[in-house]
Image (cartoon, rainbow, N blue to C red):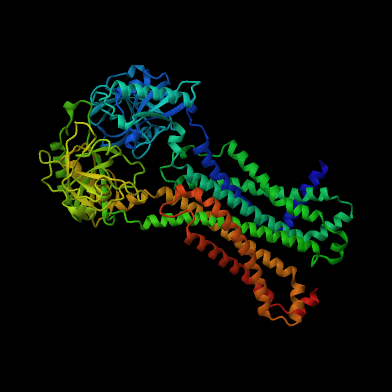
């Protein structure tokens, strides 16, 4: 114990004596440990931690599929929900999850809320506990909607000032009365997708009375979550569900077309939440691991450089009786002390980094609210701190312990074989550091190429000088109280709203649509029937249906290719028409003229046949990184849609226009809130948020790696010049020119860099294909990236080699020989 304390005291003295060296090592390690700890805490919270609900390993998302038609996770009907509950013996509990919007009225001003309609057992299945009042229970069972409502902690504080007397308050959602019976705690989040933000209010229903249509074929319920019975493995559960689906198809052939292959699938709830961000987070984790390795190699280089100046000290200690193991322990103690201090500072960096990551992260990443530094994260930080301390300290310790006593004491620090051997190790370390940097920079280059390509991608419409705004027409539970019951009434509202908005000074043109071309990550397909094509041949026909007003294509400057666009005369009671894009025309009428062809939504008899009257250019409606998705546009005045998004061509910014739009809309209907007023540039930019986030972080890590490797090359060449100063002086005394010395040192740096780059390229060729899921229009083995990165690194290496080479060439050989 005494000898260990002695090692610690001595290490502390050495660290204080070499304060500059100590600072560089500690900060390099703190950067690596901090980045790894921060990203690991995000990965752990988002991907690895179980969901914060009881029996979370048995929670699943229930998906109804039609694989024969290429449709997955499609809506289902209340009778099909009943089949899940009573006909399978698979689930303990099943709950509908129906994200929707609603207008909250009765307050000082109308609010648009994110609402989730559920079954009464939703909260009990998730083990939720209210911080105030109660949650849903058997007393809230009702054929349609019950009157009870539960609100989030955020809404309670934002709208009601955390009033403890909120229970029993009467509120109106889409003109329907509800009573607030409970307030959830701030930690509760809905484990599923929402429309735009966190759920603010929960309501419950039986889904078998108004406003829900009845019948097995009335499939409007968008989703469900369930708790699988204990002891039932996934294979057994799917066997039971397959048997149920087969019996259902057989029992109701009119509702289930054989070619659709209707089926039920279960997906672990955690996977349904985080599956889309898993590749991105794993790439970030790989990037910070590489940063840690680069930092460790750099520190090992620094320690080897110092070891080459301490071999006389080690020789004296050996001559005085110190064993090799004793000296190894002393040097490892020094490296571990450096790593522990660096690790401690790294944890502080991690705490700051986590806040920055959470602040900058796009809203598409679920569970970010759970990210924190817990004991597991601290244990991870300690583990990598100790491992890196041992890793970068072991080689210098072993080398220093092998000091040749006689030669070291006689020759001092210059020109010994020990120093040459350490120099060779340092060169190999720099080569490995260069290889790691190549891998990191190629990964960053591929992501940046993808992001840059998406920024330059033609979305098929013009985003400049366009402002968007959203409203939601109320959909009350009682059809008798519906203020917008028919297509004619809804169309009248849209026409009047567009007339008023178009009259705002600075507005050139306004239109409406049911869905903005916003780069939504979820494509809502619907089956498509094509006239005069047999069902078997159009088995996989599907498209996304979008409702637009006549001037929509003009506002967004979407070119017409054939036929005509919509007019004000395309309204209810007139022939049903549609405009399609080129992707739809090419897919379903290849080589033929689609004008005059008839299509309809679905393959049953409930929908009208619609005539194609126009073909427009393809629009990247579902994201800049999604190609070839067929879209069918319908006149807003021939269809019903309670979701209305205005697109407005204007010279005014969204912030100025928002108040005027709200005034005009609420002049028509004071109960309608206006939300999401923003520019179309912002709408499209938001679709790239996750790609921007990952590319920015990996690029930042690559820049750090490039800085570390340039410092490393400079250090090794500066040490090489110092080590070979006598040899260089003799060469110059014998007639070598300064330019020859300059070329020799520069060539040495170039050779080290070239070998490291070649090794890194070989590794990158193996690992780059794993990034394919994160790329768009960029192959994993992308020639521009694989050429630019080595060229950049070689240039940086030559730049880092320039100063040592210049210093060596500018030396006076006589002065050097006299010093030696």
In this image, 159 relative to 535: left or right?
right
The image position of residue 375, as x and y in percent, is 59, 36
Tell me what residue is drawn at x 82 percent, y 42 percent: 2
- Give the x, y percent position of residue 204: 32, 24
Q: Quadrant of the N terminus?
A: top right
In this rendering, the answer to whether 423 lies above or below 377 is: below
In the rendered view, does 160 fall on the left or right side of 659? right
**Observer-nearest residue: 549 or 492?**
549
Residue 631 lies, with reference to residue 93, above or below; the image says: below
- Who's the residue at 76% across and 73% down the image? 727
Q: Nearer the viewer, residue 812 or 183?
A: 812
Q: Which residue is found at the position 19% from the left and 31% from the top?
A: 606
* Residue at 75 percent of width and 48 percent of height: 333
Observer able to see residue 761: yes
- Where residue 815 sits in the image (x, y, percent)? 76, 78
* Furthest residue in direction bottom, as rendered: 735
Q: Quadrant location of residue 640?
A: top left
């Amino acid at each position: 114990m005494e000898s260990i304390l002695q090692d610690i005291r001595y290490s502390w003295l050495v660290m204080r004596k070499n304060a500059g060296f100590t600072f560089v090592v500690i900060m390099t390690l703190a950067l690596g440990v901090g980045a790894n700890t921060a990203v690991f805490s995000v990965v752990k919270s988002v991907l690895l931690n179980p969901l914060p609900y009881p029996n979370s390993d048995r929670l699943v998302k229930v998906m109804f599929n039609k694989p024969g038609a290429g449709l997955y996770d499609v809506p289902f009907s209340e009778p099909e929900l009943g089949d899940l509950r009573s006909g399978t013996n698979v689930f303990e509990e099943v709950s509908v999850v129906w994200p929707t919007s609603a207008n909250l009225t009765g307050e000082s001003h109308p609010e648009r809320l994110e609402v989730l309609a559920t079954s009464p057992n939703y909260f009990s299945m998730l083990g939720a506990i209210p911080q105030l009042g109660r949650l849903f229970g058997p007393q809230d069972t009702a054929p349609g909607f019950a009157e009870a409502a539960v609100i989030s902690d955020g809404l309670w504080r934002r709208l009601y000032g955390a009033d403890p007397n909120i229970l029993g308050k009467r509120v109106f959602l889409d003109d329907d009365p509800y009573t607030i019976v409970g307030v959830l705690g701030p930690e509760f989040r809905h484990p599923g997708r929402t429309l735009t933000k966190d759920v603010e209010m929960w309501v419950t229903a039986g889904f078998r009375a108004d406003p829900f249509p009845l019948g097995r074929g009335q499939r409007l319920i968008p989703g469900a979550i369930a708790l699988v019975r204990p002891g039932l493995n996934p294979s057994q559960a799917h066997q039971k569900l397959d048997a149920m689906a087969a019996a259902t198809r057989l029992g109701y052939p009119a509702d289930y077309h054989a070619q659709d292959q209707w089926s039920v699938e279960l997906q672990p709830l955690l996977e349904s939440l985080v599956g889309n961000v898993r590749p991105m987070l794993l790439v970030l984790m790989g990037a910070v691991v590489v940063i840690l390795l680069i930092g460790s190699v750099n520190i090992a280089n620094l320690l080897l450089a110092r070891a080459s100046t301490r071999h006389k000290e080690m020789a004296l200690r050996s001559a005085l009786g110190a064993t090799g193991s004793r000296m190894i322990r002393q040097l490892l103690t020094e490296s571990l002390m450096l790593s522990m201090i660096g690790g401690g500072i790294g944890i502080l960096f991690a705490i700051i980094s986590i806040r920055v990551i959470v602040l900058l992260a796009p809203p598409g990443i679920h569970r970010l609210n759970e990210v924190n530094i817990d004991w597991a994260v601290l244990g991870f930080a300690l583990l990598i701190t100790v491992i890196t301390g041992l890793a970068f300290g072991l080689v210098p310790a072993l080398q220093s312990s092998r000091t040749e006593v006689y030669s070291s004491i006689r020759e001092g620090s210059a020109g010994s074989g020990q120093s040459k051997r350490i120099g060779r190790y340092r060169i190999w370390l720099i080569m490995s550091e260069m290889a790691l940097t190549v891998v990191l920079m190629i990964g960053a280059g591929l992501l940046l190429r993808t992001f840059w390509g998406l920024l330059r991608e033609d979305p098929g419409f013009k985003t400049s000088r366009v402002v968007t705004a959203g409203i939601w027409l109320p959909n009350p539970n009682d059809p008798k109280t519906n203020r917008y019951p028919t297509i004619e009434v809804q169309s009248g509202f849209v026409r009047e709203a567009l007339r008023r908005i178009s009259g705002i000074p600075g507005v050139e043109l306004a239109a409406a649509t049911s869905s903005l071309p916003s780069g939504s990550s979820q494509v809502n397909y619907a089956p498509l029937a094509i006239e005069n094509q047999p069902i078997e041949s159009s088995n996989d026909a599907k498209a996304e249906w979008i409702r637009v007003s006549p001037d929509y294509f003009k506002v967004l400057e979407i070119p017409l290719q054939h036929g005509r666009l919509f007019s004000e005369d395309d309204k209810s009671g007139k022939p049903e028409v549609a405009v399609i894009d080129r992707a739809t025309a090419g897919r379903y009428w290849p080589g033929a003229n689609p004008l005059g062809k008839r299509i309809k939504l679905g393959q049953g008899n409930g929908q009208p046949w619609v005539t194609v009257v126009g073909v427009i250019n393809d629009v990247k409606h579902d994201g800049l990184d999604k190609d070839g998705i067929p879209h069918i546009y319908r006149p807003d005045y021939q269809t019903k849609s309670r979701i209305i998004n205005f697109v407005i061509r204007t010279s005014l910014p969204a912030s100025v226009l928002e108040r005027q739009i709200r005034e005009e809309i609420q002049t028509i209907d004071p109960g309608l809130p206006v939300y999401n007023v923003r520019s179309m540039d912002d709408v499209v930019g938001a679709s790239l948020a996750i790609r921007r986030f990952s590319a920015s972080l990996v690029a930042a890590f690559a820049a750090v790696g490039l800085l570390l490797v340039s410092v490393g090359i400079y250090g090794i060449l500066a040490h090489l010049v110092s080590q070979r100063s006598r040899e260089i002086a003799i060469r110059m005394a014998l007639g070598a020119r300064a330019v020859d010395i300059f070329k020799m040192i520069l060539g040495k740096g170039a050779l080290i860099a070239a070998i490291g780059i070649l090794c890194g390229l070989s590794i990158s060729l193996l690992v780059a294909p794993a990034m394919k899921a994160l790329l768009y229009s960029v192959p994993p083995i992308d020639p521009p990236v694989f050429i630019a990165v080595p060229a950049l690194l070689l240039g940086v290496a030559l730049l880092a080699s320039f100063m040592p080479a210049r210093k060596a060439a500018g030396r006076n050989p006589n002065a050097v020989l006299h010093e030696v």
